[in-house]
Image: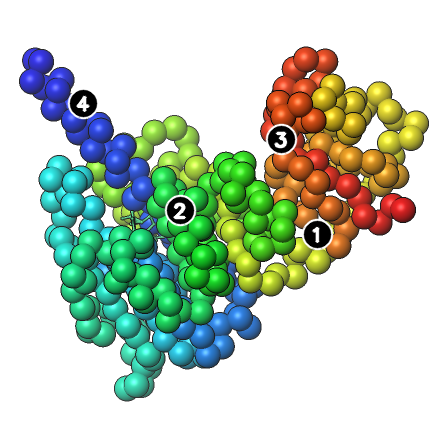
Amino acid sequence: MIAEKTLNQTLHIAKSAKKDEFYTQLSDIESELKHYEKHFKNKVVFCNCDDPRNSNFFNYFAYNFEKLGLKKLITTCYINQETDLFFQEENEKAVFLEYTGDKNGNKIPDAEEIGLTPLKGDGDFRSKESIDLLKQADIVVTNPPFSLFREYVDQLVKYEKKFLIIGNINAITYKEIFKLIKENKAWLGINMGRGISGFIVPDRYELYGTETRIDDFGNRIISPNNCLWLTNLETFKRHEDIVLTKKYYGNEFEYPKFDNYEAINVNKTQDIPLDYEGVMGVPITFLHKYNPEQFELIKFRKGNDDKDLSINGKCPYFRILIKNKRIK
Ligand SMILES: C[S@@+](CC[C@H](N)C(=O)[O-])C[C@H]1O[C@@H](n2cnc3c(N)ncnc32)[C@H](O)[C@@H]1O
């Protein structure tokens, strides 16, 4: 009985370590990537957390290689040595693949046929092997391991790469990521939350809650509804103004002031008043609609005392402090 319990606990730990195994659906990749096609002409694309044998990022770029006018596609996969003790998988060797287009007609590219080259190491995106490939790349596109998101983005910034990656909405609350957004070095992509329909998870994942299903191909899909795309590729969306309809003056009671910062609280992005010239605290989801020509990002989360922004002693939610640039 005790042995069984210990085994269960051990499996649970191994499973948690593998919680990064959320595979992106082709439909979600297509509905985001269609907004960036012009950026890919003559570019080297690198998917550095992608086993070409099961990645839809590989499928998307290999299939659309000619249409996008790509120069080269590189993908590398990672093999986690520790957890594979528990979950022996067929593909035990980290590999990489380079694809330069369909030279023999209109075949749908197949990873095994193109040819997989074994990597010397485990395919970690931080390894020298992987960084050498990163240096060749113009644009990195993938869904990286959420547990290493900060480090992952840090590396992209360090090597000055263009990127389009999936992350958790919470990532905005990391000060490193917020700093990039504030400095206009990264922004949110087109789809977020329910706009990303779900991820394929391995069979061993338990399906829990209502946001889970099995698709027509038998894939197990989990829809966490808390993901976003983060990018530094230009999009139309960040140049569109948020349409404001509410007024502050005459409705002051709806917008209480913070205790520890000279700013009013706004509970929903759509309630941002069109006539308030001072600083406003808005929910983090505001960033999905943020147009840097319309608003300025002032500060994140903390008041003048470096404590969380509060109203009458209570700190309801994370807030981003913004200012409307169009009101002089
Ligand atoms: C969220 S999954 C997404 C997989 C794939 N990119 C996709 O979108 O379908 C993250 C992937 O990163 C891999 N991974 C975990 N740690 C890694 C590391 N240090 N370096 C590279 N890849 C890693 C995992 O094996 C996993 O396949």
Give the class, few, some or many, for how many residues have Cα within 10 Å of label 2's Cα (few <14, many ≥20). Answer: some
Q: Kindly identify which residue carries mark 4.
A: 9
Give the class, few, some or many, for how many residues have Cα within 10 Å of label 1's Cα (few <14, many ≥20). Answer: some
What number is the disc on residue 65?
none
Disc 1 to disc 3, C-alpha distance: 20 Å
Pick whichever of labels 4 and 1 is earlier in the sequence: 4
Q: Which tag is nearer the camera, tag 2 or tag 4?
A: 2
Near-viewer residue (48 or 211): 48
Confirm or deny contact between disc 1 and disc 3 (CB under 8 A).
no
Could you tell me residue 138's position as x and y percent? 44, 69
Residue drawn at (36%, 61%) of the image: 47
Could you tell me residue 31's position as x and y percent? 50, 58
Q: Kindly identify which residue carries mark 1.
A: 291
Pick whichever of labels 2 and 4 is earlier in the sequence: 4
Disc 4 to disc 1, C-alpha distance: 47 Å
Q: Kindly identify which residue carries mark 2.
A: 151
Confirm or deny contact between disc 2 and disc 4 (CB under 8 A).
no
Disc 2 to disc 1, C-alpha distance: 27 Å
Tell me the SS state at disc 1: loop
Pick whichever of labels 2 and 1 is earlier in the sequence: 2
**Amino acid on which the number 4 mark rests in the picture:** Gln
Q: State yes or no: Cβ of the residue under disc 1 lies below 8 Å from any atom of ligand 1.
A: no
Near-viewer residue (166 or 259): 259
Q: Kindly identify which residue carries mark 3.
A: 301
Disc 2 to disc 4, C-alpha distance: 29 Å
